[in-house]
């Protein structure tokens, strides 16, 4: 893509689609896009944007869009148990305890700490799932999943489109951006021009370490020369990657905004749609447990036996390891979103064309009883408490049908115009005071429709 074509496109608003990581929870993103745009094909949706960026599970959604799948088909990739298990291919117990010839493998395996899935089988599974849904193979005789990113904008029908997927270089221990725009100004400092095949890019980006996959993802990018026009690769090499979340980009919206601005987009012209993969945790009251504030004491006393609240403090080595292994998935998302928003609107007036959509299922505070309760929309079920507890405990690698069904139900309780509903993640603040963002999906949808 030439910079001239990019500048022509900048005459109007510059639309950015950003998709968080989150494993099977990326189903939320597919459901949101389906509701916003209807059941259109991936290429038609991508042509509505100027830049699309994804990490991990979000990169798989982006790959499905590049594969020109219907949005309903993308939902099915996450809802179909066979497809999920091809991506999350479980290691046997024996595989776990002999992982990497680890002398402590048996001990680690018994503690439930360490990888659960095969990295090698993941690439096979991703390739198979996307190849089977490739609607253009008959006319191209080449799978989109095997196509270098730099060839995709022309194939999609919008040469000015920029695509980005994020990984973490295992040996160099730094972030890597896999781009379709080989002339990106953010990459002027490199003498090499990489054309990463789509399948390899999402394989690298969706490879969460330590407690998930058993090895860095092995990928083979094409290396191009700048002239003539990056048409013929010079050679290929091999690189190894962990999930882009390791580099702090589980929510890639800030990276997408920087990419847009450094390539000529004006911050004031940017319209951003940032979609998460759900957020919910037990309420943490450990920091106020020793407070001398009478109101804090009342709150702690009212919730001391609440299953949705943590009031005690304990530090257990096993739990610490697991916490660190999974903390990369948290980013935290609101940090990247807030910084990116601040670039668009330094006055924090909540007027920027920045729409964050992410369902929240954390407990809600009842001012009358001082007790944290399940969200109102889950109170209509007799087992609402049990469902929220399971959702909070549900990891990003939801594979079993019962687990994914909980995510589907969550989407139904969030992607709605009726009340009660699950709240939407705010960029900053809370609805009891001043805040940035949209409090409900309905508000977020209405705001984005004005940007479309």
Image: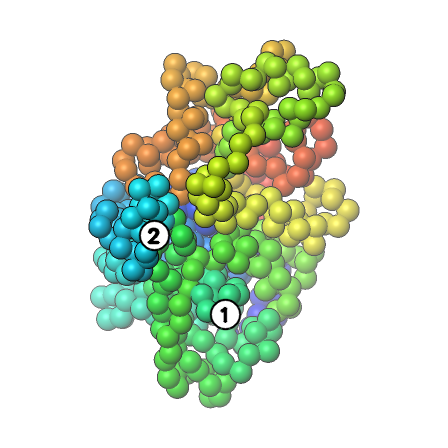
In the image, 425: left or right of 156? right
Q: Is residue 251 left or right of residue 80?
A: right
Mark 2 and mark 1: Cα distance apart in space:
26 Å
Q: Position of residue 400 (x, y in %)?
A: 28, 38
Q: Residue furthest bottom?
A: 228
The residue that mark 1 highlights is 172
Residue under numbered circle 2: 104
Which residue is at 26% across, 43% downward?
80
**Mark 1 neighbour class, 10 Å CA radius: few under 14, some 14 to 19, many 20 or more:** few
Residue 231 locus on image (x, y percent): 41, 83
Q: Position of residue 177 (x, y in %)?
A: 50, 66
Q: Is residue 166 above or below residue 397?
A: below
Asked whether 325 or 129 is in front, the reply is 325
State the residue lying farthest toward the front.
103
Looking at the image, is mark 2 or mark 1 nearer the viewer? Answer: 2
Q: Where in the figure is residue 306, as x and y percent of width and height?
A: 51, 18
Residue drawn at (65%, 47%), measured in percent from left and top?
338
Q: Residues within 10 Å of mark 2 (few under 14, many from 20)?
A: few
Q: Which is more toward the observer, 87 or 309?
A: 309
Viewer can see residue 78: no
How is the model colour-coded? Answer: rainbow
Residue 301 seen in render:
yes
């Amino acid at each position: 893509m030439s910079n001239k074509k990019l500048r022509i496109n900048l005459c109007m608003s510059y639309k950015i689609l950003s998709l968080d990581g989150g494993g099977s929870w990326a189903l939320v993103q597919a459901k949101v896009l389906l509701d916003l745009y209807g059941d259109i094909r991936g290429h038609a949706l991508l042509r509505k944007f100027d830049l699309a960026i994804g990490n991990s599970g979000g990169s798989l959604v982006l790959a499905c869009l590049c594969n020109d799948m219907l949005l309903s088909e993308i939902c099915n990739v996450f809802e179909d148990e066979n497809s999920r298990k091809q991506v999350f291919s479980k290691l046997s117990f024996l595989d776990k305890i002999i992982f990497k010839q680890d002398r402590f493998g048996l001990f680690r395996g018994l503690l439930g700490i360490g990888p659960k899935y095969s990295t090698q089988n993941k690439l096979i599974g991703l390739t198979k799932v996307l190849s089977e849904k490739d609607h253009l193979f008959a006319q191209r005789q080449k799978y989109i999943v095997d196509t270098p990113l730099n060839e995709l904008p022309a194939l999609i029908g919008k040469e000015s489109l920029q695509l980005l997927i994020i990984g973490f270089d295992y040996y160099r221990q730094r972030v890597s951006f896999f781009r379709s725009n080989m002339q990106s100004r953010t990459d002027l400092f490199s003498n090499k021009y990489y054309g990463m095949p789509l399948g390899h890019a999402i394989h690298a980006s969706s490879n969460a370490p330590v407690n998930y996959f058993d090895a860095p993802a092995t990928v083979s990018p094409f290396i191009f020369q700048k002239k003539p026009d990056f048409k013929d690769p010079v050679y290929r090499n091999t690189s190894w990657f962990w999930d882009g979340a390791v580099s702090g980009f589980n929510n890639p919206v800030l990276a997408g905004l920087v990419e847009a601005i450094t390539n000529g987009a004006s911050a004031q012209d940017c319209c951003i749609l940032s979609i998460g993969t759900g957020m919910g945790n037990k309420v943490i009251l450990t920091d106020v447990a020793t407070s001398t504030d009478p109101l804090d004491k009342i709150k702690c006393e009212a919730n001391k036996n609440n299953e949705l609240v943590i009031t005690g403090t304990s530090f257990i080595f096993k739990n610490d390891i697991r916490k660190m292994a999974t903390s990369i998935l948290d980013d935290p998302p609101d940090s990247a979103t807030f910084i990116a928003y601040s670039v668009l609107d330094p006055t924090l007036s909540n007027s920027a064309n920045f729409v964050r959509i992410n369902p929240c299922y954390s407990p809600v505070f009842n001012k009358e009883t001082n007790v944290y309760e399940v969200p109102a929309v889950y109170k209509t079920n007799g087992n609402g408490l049990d469902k929220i507890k399971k959702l909070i405990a549900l990891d990003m690698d939801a594979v079993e049908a019962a687990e994914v069904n909980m995510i589907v139900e969550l989407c139904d309780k969030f992607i709605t115009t009726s009340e009660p509903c699950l709240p939407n993640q705010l960029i900053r603040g809370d609805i009891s005071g001043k805040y940035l963002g949209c409090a409900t999906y309905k508000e977020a949808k209405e705001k984005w429709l004005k940007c479309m």
